[in-house]
Amino acid sequence: MTNKILNIGIMSRLDYIQRTIAIAKGDYQPLPDEPKIWFESVKSMAQVLSDENQALLDLIIRHQPQSLSELEQLSHRKKPNLSRTLKTLERYGVVELHKQAGKLAPTVKATDFRVQFGLHHGNAA
């Protein structure tokens, strides 16, 4: 698997809303290398990319499970917990869940993360 870098941004909800409005109005044009995935805080990013979730991603890469049941056995995590975690990781573009032979199978889309943040109080762009 080739390493795919996911650009992540951290910005307060208010700044994110202001940025989105500026983009919609045409007042701000995001650069191509700017993050597409945003978190409200370093803490929220750390929860999604926790050590436990990184170990799960590594397990998926190494074993390429063909179903959540198979991943449940490999990871020793219950299916509801796995499903919730994988859906969160999918929402942030880290994994992709796809149907395969009637079963849901995870694929890791991002292996490396570049984080961009700063103190932008009131400055959305």
Image (spheres, rainbow, N blue to C red):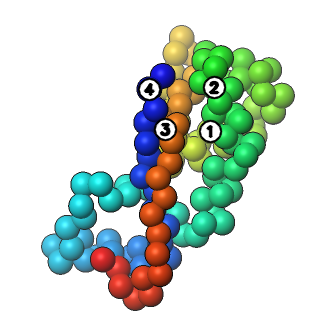
Measure how far apart labels 1 and 4 are at the Cα level.
Answer: 21 Å
Is 100 in front, or is 2? 2
Q: Nearer the viewer, mark 2 or mark 4?
A: 4
Is 2 in front, or is 69? 2
Residue holding disc 2: 60
- Residue placed farthest to the left in the image? 26
Choose top left, top right, bottom left or bottom right for residue 9. bottom left
Residue holding disc 3: 110
Which residue is depicted at the point 48% across and 58% down? 115
Measure how far apart labels 2 and 1 are at the Cα level.
Answer: 11 Å
Q: Are marks 2 and 1 in contact (CB under 8 Å)?
A: no
Which residue is depicted at the point 48% across and 22% down? 1
Q: Position of residue 45 (x, y in %)?
A: 60, 59
Residue holding disc 1: 86
Which residue is depicted at the point 24% across and 61% down? 31
Amino acid under disc 4: Thr
Callout 4: few (<14), some (14-19), or many (20+) C-alpha neighbours within 10 Å? few
Callout 2: few (<14), some (14-19), or many (20+) C-alpha neighbours within 10 Å? many
Q: Mark 2: which secondary structure? A: helix
Residue holding disc 4: 2
